Structure formats: structure tokens, C-alpha cells
Amino acid sequence: MHPAVEQIRQYLQLIALQFVQHPEQAELRVAESPQGDAVRFRLILEKTDVARIIGRNGMTASAIRSLAKAAGEKNGIKVIVHMLSHEEAAEQA
């Protein structure tokens, strides 16, 4: 794992734990592209916590994504951050 990816992972974990009420159910999945130039983070939370982390009009989620993308761009990595509930993750699997 690229050191920048690990730093972004730690950042997302820190932020998620600050916003959610059920941190024990929070899960962060990381998927890197085979070329190593892109990474996708899936922050899977309790349904009520998803609303908290998205924020009013999506402003909180937008800020979190912007900071993660900026950190990735600085290191030449495309970063995608998804925030979804356990139910939504199960449907996509």
C-alpha cells in the first residue's frame, strides 16, 4: 500500500469516528487499482450515521471527499470516497 493511501485511510478513520454515534459498526474498505494510480475508499456505517456524516445538503461529505482527493492528487493518486450504510453495501455485493 502506498504511504499516501495509508495516510488518507487514517484521516478517513479519524473523521468517521468524530461524526458517528456507532463507531464499533464503522468499517473502512480500501481497494487500489492494479496500476496503483487510483484508490477507492468505502466507508460503511450504521444507517443513522450515514446521514450524520453526509451532513446538511451534503456539505460535510463534500468537504471530506475534497480533502481526501487533494491528498491523493498531491501524490498522483485518484481518490474516490463512498459513504454508505451496511444495507446499501450488502445490496451492491
Image (tube, rainbow, N blue to C red):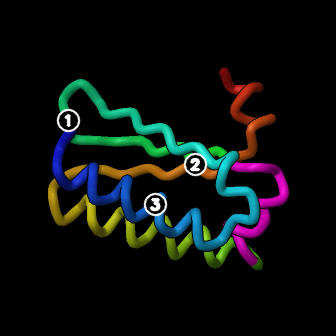
Would you place residue 18 above or below residue 43 in this image? below
Task: Specify the amino acid type for callout 1.
Answer: Gly
Return the residue at label 2.
43
Residue 91 locus on image (x, y percent): 76, 26
Q: Residue at x 57, y 48 (%)?
A: 43
Q: Upstream in the sequence, badge 1 or badge 3?
A: 3
Return the residue at label 3.
12
Q: Upstream in the sequence, badge 2 or badge 3?
A: 3
Q: Upstream in the sequence, badge 1 or badge 2?
A: 1
Return the residue at label 1.
36
Quarter holding residue 56: bottom right
For the stretch drawn in magenta, the main secondary structure is helix
The kind of secondary structure element at disc 1 is: loop
Magenta includes 47? Answer: yes
* Front residue (pair 26, 37): 26
Task: Specify the amino acid type for callout 2.
Answer: Leu
Whether the residues at callouts 2 and 3 have beta carbons within 8 Å, the answer is: yes
Quarter occupied by the N terminus: top left
Q: CA distance from mark 1 to mark 2?
A: 20 Å
Q: Residue at x 29, y 30 (%)?
A: 33
Magenta range is 45-55
Residue 26 locus on image (x, y percent): 63, 49
Q: Nearer the viewer, mark 1 or mark 2?
A: 2
The kind of secondary structure element at disc 2 is: strand
Q: Residues within 10 Å of mark 3 (few under 14, many from 20)?
A: many
Magenta includes 51? Answer: yes
Residue lying at the far right of the rendered structure: 48
